[in-house]
Image (spheres, helix red, strand yellow):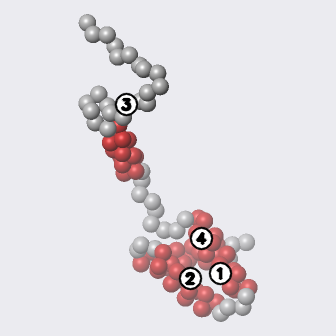
């Protein structure tokens, strides 16, 4: 019968598993699995971004900018930030609801 391994004080833990594979490989596999197991993010804007864009719109409105120019600029920002062009008008309406919320 074999004796169990003896732990030697002052030595760092073994970087290899019982098969000689680096333990880092297991960690990377688990991290990749965890990332892939997460649900995909929603394709639209975050609540924080709605507020940021609404604040931007209000600031420029208060400074006297033409509302039509602001709407055009907001649509351009949304086209640059959104992955799907069909979401631009949907997200535009959502931002505008925040702009005019009391």
In percent of the image, x 56 and y 82: which residue is there?
74
Q: For the residues marked 2 and 4, what is the alpha-carbon distance in whole angstroms?
A: 11 Å
Q: Earlier in the sequence, mark 2 or mark 3?
A: 3
Q: Nearer the viewer, residue 14 or 73?
A: 14
Q: Nearer the viewer, residue 75 or 2?
A: 2
Q: Earlier in the sequence, mark 3 or mark 1?
A: 3
Give the image location of residue 20, x and y in percent: 27, 33
Q: For the residues marked 4 and 3, what is the alpha-carbon distance in whole angstroms?
A: 49 Å
| Disc 3: CA contacts within 10 A as few (<14), some (14-19) or many (>=20) | few
Q: Which residue is mark 3?
A: 14
Q: Which residue is mark 2?
A: 74
Q: For the residues marked 2 and 1, what is the alpha-carbon distance in whole angstroms?
A: 8 Å
In percent of the image, x 36 and y 34: which residue is there?
15
Q: Which disc, if any, is residue 57? A: 1
Q: For the residues marked 1 and 4, what is the alpha-carbon distance in whole angstroms?
A: 11 Å
12 relative to 35, above or below: above
In percent of the image, x 65 and y 78: which residue is there?
56
Q: Secondary structure at mark 2?
A: helix
Quarter placement of the N terminus: top left
In terms of image quadrants, where is residue 50? bottom right
Q: How many marks?
A: 4
Q: Is residue 55 left or right of residue 32?
A: right
Q: Earlier in the sequence, mark 2 or mark 4?
A: 4
Nearer the viewer's eye, disc 2 or disc 3? 3
């Amino acid at each position: 019968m074999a004796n169990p391994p003896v732990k030697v004080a002052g030595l760092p833990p073994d970087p290899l598993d019982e098969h000689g594979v680096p333990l880092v490989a297991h960690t990377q596999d688990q991290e990749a699995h965890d990332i892939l197991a997460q649900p995909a993010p929603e394709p639209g804007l975050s609540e924080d971004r709605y507020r940021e864009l609404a604040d931007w719109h209000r600031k420029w409105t208060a400074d006297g900018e033409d509302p039509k120019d602001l709407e055009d600029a907001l649509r351009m920002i949304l086209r640059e930030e959104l992955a799907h062009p069909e979401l631009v008008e949907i997200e535009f309406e959502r931002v505008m609801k925040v702009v005019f919320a009391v």
